[in-house]
Image (cartoon, helix red, strand yellow):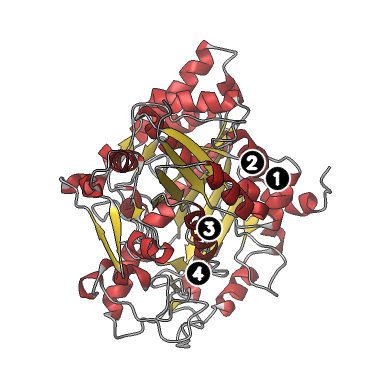
Amino acid sequence: MSRALVTLVNPNLVHPPITPYALDILTTSLEEAGFDVEVLDLTLARDRWHDVVRDYFRRADPVLVGVTIRNTDTIYPQEQRVFLDSHKNIISAIQRYTSAPIVAGGVGFSSMPFALVDYFGIDYGVKGPGEVTLVRLAKALLAARSVETTPGLIINSGNGVVRQVPYDDPLVAAGRVHLTNRATPYRRHSGRRDRVDNLAYYRRGGLGNILTKNGCTFACTHCVEPDAKGTRFARRTETAVVDEMELLCEQGVHDLHTTDSEFNLNISHSKKVLREIIRRKRADQASALHRLRLWIYVQPAPFDAEYAELLAEAGCAGINLAPDHVRDDILNGWKVSGKGRRFYTFEDVHELCRLARKHGMATMVEALLGMPGETEHTMRECVDAFQSLDATVVGYTLGIRAFPYSPLGRQLAAASAGTRAVPGVQSNTATAPILLTPLEKCRSTLAYERQFMFDEAGGFRPVYYFSPDLPEGHDGDPAQRWHRSLELLWDWVPQHDRHRVMLPTVPGLSPEDNNYADNPFLLRLTDLGYTGAYWSHWPQRHTIMQTAPA
């Protein structure tokens, strides 16, 4: 007798394609629970997605359809491109061809789940790790039980009423450690049409991905991940992680980037993972791990000499770190631990770059400009300090996306109180002052979340913040573009250093574009067969762009 089918859909149409790791994670848990699983991956069929959806659901009869929403928008302050309309088009097509209930999840979805369940017009949502909740939901539907037995499930009751089944334990609701499968490897496949094709994504996008732990205990002001993923570290066993790495390398996926919030936070666990990689490489000269190239996201601290040595021997090719700024008065209260304390200095950034260079690992150091208190003077000081670093690439972002549950989003809503336009709050599509109401004063959670993405007429209006103390900050126009600050930023970076610098762009300022979505340089890289983090090729971009694909 055939088992009940759950269909998992990837609606992301952006290229270069990013492997939908969440669907491998969910497939693993659903199969362990006795369900058949099929992945309907539309990223690699984006020019014919409607035909693929129609043909699939004409033959398939799932008990549940799960949709992963990785990103709501680019979060790139100068572009502010929203993806939700294309996601909704795909979900609407699915609804035309099947009566199966639809549940959505993913980190982008989890940043505003009540608003998105309502916007998409779907039945259910899952905030945070979905492997436990999705299995419980599928079992309830299969047994014709009430879905009210599924803790954490977000339910769309219609007519703008969206609610969440409470968790039995509030610690689970916040930390979510027990909602993550930490003990077994996630099943990764290549070459199967009914699964995520990891090798195809690698060939088209240049990177695979690996998760060593979920959640984050830190409280950085702009970050959504503690709220979206959990406020505790859900550490996967190092053997499970390295089993998965080895399997991907055997399939030909050699460049893996870590999808942890930051790989070096909870550094003792990170070192255990690295030691397990090294142990297997030393024990077996034929291990596919010898072909591993690891690309990691880290904070400037903790990072010691032993850690650098372990990274190098394990096969780390590049390190992406985000110190954000150089000035303590701007970073204090912004980049902080869960207890509100700063955890690094700019000397830590210099030391990390030195250790990376010593061991032959590339570095990308990122600045985040436009935080509260940023002025022309502090921005110039940050540029000068970052240009002094011995880094392979230096990147700058001007402006910050504000989400409902990031500390920044909550602070802006409190300052606005639904009645005052907060200086520096901006959206390219704003046609009126942006007023944000705190959650406790909103009529519903749905209403609170909506105001960070939609205007009163229902149009897209993602909310951003730029320091009003920058040169153009007192204009009062909610759609102000901050072009003068961009021009200053370009002026301050010496021409001889431009080759290794990624600068934010607007039309007319430069032909370059460092945003990820449908980026011409990235698309050329993948056409030419380059692999690894795209920033590592940035210094050679002019030569690469002049190279014709074979």
Identify the residue under disc 4: 379
Which numbered circle lies on residue 93? 3
- State the separation of the CA atoms marked 1 and 4: 34 Å
Whichever of labels 1 and 4 marks the residue nearer the N terminus, that label is 4
Identify the residue under disc 2: 206
For the point 47% across and 43% down, the residue is 8
The reply, left or right, for residue 143 in relation to residue 374 is left
- What x and y, as percent, mark residue 254? 60, 30
- 465 shown above or below 40: below
Whichever of labels 4 and 2 marks the residue nearer the N terminus, that label is 2
- State the separation of the CA atoms marked 1 and 2: 6 Å
- State the separation of the CA atoms marked 3 and 4: 47 Å
- State the separation of the CA atoms marked 2 and 3: 30 Å
- 73 shown above or below 431: above
For the point 26% across and 51% down, the residue is 338
Identify the residue under disc 1: 526
Mark 3: amino acid: Ala
Q: Secondary structure at mark 3?
A: helix
Mark 2: amino acid: Gly
Mark 1: amino acid: Thr
